[in-house]
Amino acid sequence: MRTALATLALLVVACAAQPTEQAAATHSKQTTAAAEPTTAKPASPTTGPRADCGDALQLLLSVPHDPPTRAQVDSACAAPVAALVQVADDDSALALRRLRAVTLLGTYDSTEAQDALERALHAELASVRRTAVAALAKHRASARRDTLLRKALEDGDPHVRAETARALKGDSTPATRDALAGARERETVPFVKALLE
């Protein structure tokens, strides 16, 4: 038995020491390829933004501890706002995905994004409403945006009202000052009242 094992070991060593014709050909190709200048391959049509980016977007929105950036969403989707709106409007979507979609809509100052954020202000989950307020606050000041934020001062959840107070803090328009004064008078939750002072 020892003799058979010793013979087998010698065969393995001998085979490993002598390169086969195939190995030599591969080595020759690799050496030639390394010496030749390479030309860039044209981008594949699948590497750019895709019209239907559902799976890619769901993956981006699901990565724990690493929310996606607008640039990542733009590179994954040909129509990023429409894709984000679809997730933001989905009551059955995972909460993390929905909240991230609503947050990202704050980076797209468009009518379509504002429409979705307005719908999010009426969501059942207070966390979605609060996130919609924060996202709207990132949009350019406009009569519509400011009206939506002032209405959010009347939300039933104190955290939504607190986020709204933060969002409207620097707005000195008469309508907003009046809305903040009215909210201050009727507010009963101490931490929200402090933000309205």
Image: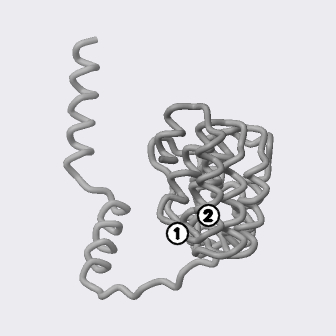
The kind of secondary structure element at disc 1 is loop
Residue, x 57% and y 55% (percent of image)? 134
Say above or below: 123 vs 105. above
Q: Which residue is mark 1?
A: 172
Q: Position of residue 187 (x, y in %)?
A: 62, 38
Name the foreground residue: 164 vs 64: 164
Q: Secondary structure at mark 2?
A: helix
Q: Nearer the viewer, residue 51 or 151?
A: 151
For disc 2, the neighbor class at 10 Å (few under 14, some 14 to 19, many from 20) is some
Residue sitting at x 58%, y 60%: 104
Image label count: 2
Residue type indicated by callout 2: Thr
Q: Which residue is mark 2?
A: 176
84, above or below 120, in the image: below
Residue 21: percent from the left, percent from the top? 34, 62
Please say which color scheme the image uses.
one colour
Q: Is residue 162 left or right of residue 1?
A: right
